[in-house]
Image (spheres, grey):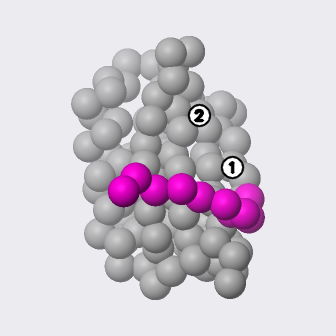
Amino acid sequence: MTQVAEIVTFLLAPNVSVKDFVALSQASEAFVRATPGFVHRQLSQGADGRWTDYVIWQDMETAQKVAAVFPKQDFAPALMAAIAPGSEQMRHEKVHWQMKAG
C-alpha cells in the first residue's frame, strides 16, 4: 500500500492572524484524527507568506474521500473563509520514500 501526501498551499485572507488561523485549523483536528487512514499532518508558513497544509494518508482512496467530505464539516466554512480566495492549490502525491528521526 502506497501512502499519499495531500499538499495544500494557500495565502491567508486579509486581516486573518497566524494565531487565529492556527486555531481554526486545530478545530479540524478531531475530524482528521478520527478518519481511518490518517497518518500525519503538519501546517507551515514560508517566508513568502504562503502556507502549506501537509497530510499523509494511508492511500489515494482515503485521501480523495476525505478531500470530498472535508468542506462539508461544521468547522470548514470558517477555515475556508480565512484563506484568500483563489490562492489555494491542492494536489495528491504518492509517497515513494520517507525518513524519520531516530
Kindly identify the residue that appears in the image at 56 percent across and 70 percent down.
Answer: 57
Q: Nearer the viewer, residue 59 or 66?
A: 59
Query: Is 41 above or below relative to 24?
Result: below
SS at mark 1 in the image: strand
Kindly identify the residue that appears in the image at 40 percent across and 53 percent down.
Answer: 101
Reading the image, the residue beneath label 1 is 90
Estimate the spatial distance between the alpha carbons at disc 1 and disc 2, rounded to whole Å: 9 Å
Image x and y of residue 12, in percent: 48, 28
- Say whether residue 27 is magenta: no
Is 36 situated left or right of 91 in this image? Answer: left
Would you identify the image quadrant in which residue 6 lies? bottom right
- Say whether residue 100 is magenta: yes
Q: Is residue 68 visible?
A: no
Kindly identify the residue that appears in the image at 51 percent across and 46 percent down.
Answer: 53
SS at mark 2 in the image: strand
Q: Nearer the viewer, residue 7 or 96?
A: 96
Q: Which residue type carries mark 1?
A: Met
**Quarter of the figure with the N terminus:** bottom right
Q: Which residues are magenta?
A: 93-102
Image x and y of residue 88, in percent: 64, 38
Image x and y of residue 38, in percent: 47, 73
Q: Is residue 67 visible?
A: yes
Q: Nearer the viewer, residue 80 or 42?
A: 42
Tell me if mark 2 has few (under 14), some (14-19) or many (20+) residues whose alpha carbon lies within 10 angstroms of its own: some
Reading the image, the residue beneath label 2 is 10
Tell me if mark 1 has few (under 14), some (14-19) or many (20+) residues whose alpha carbon lies within 10 angstroms of its own: few
Q: Which residue type carries mark 2?
A: Phe
Query: Is 43 above or below relative to 12?
Result: below
Query: Is 32 above or below relative to 16?
Result: below
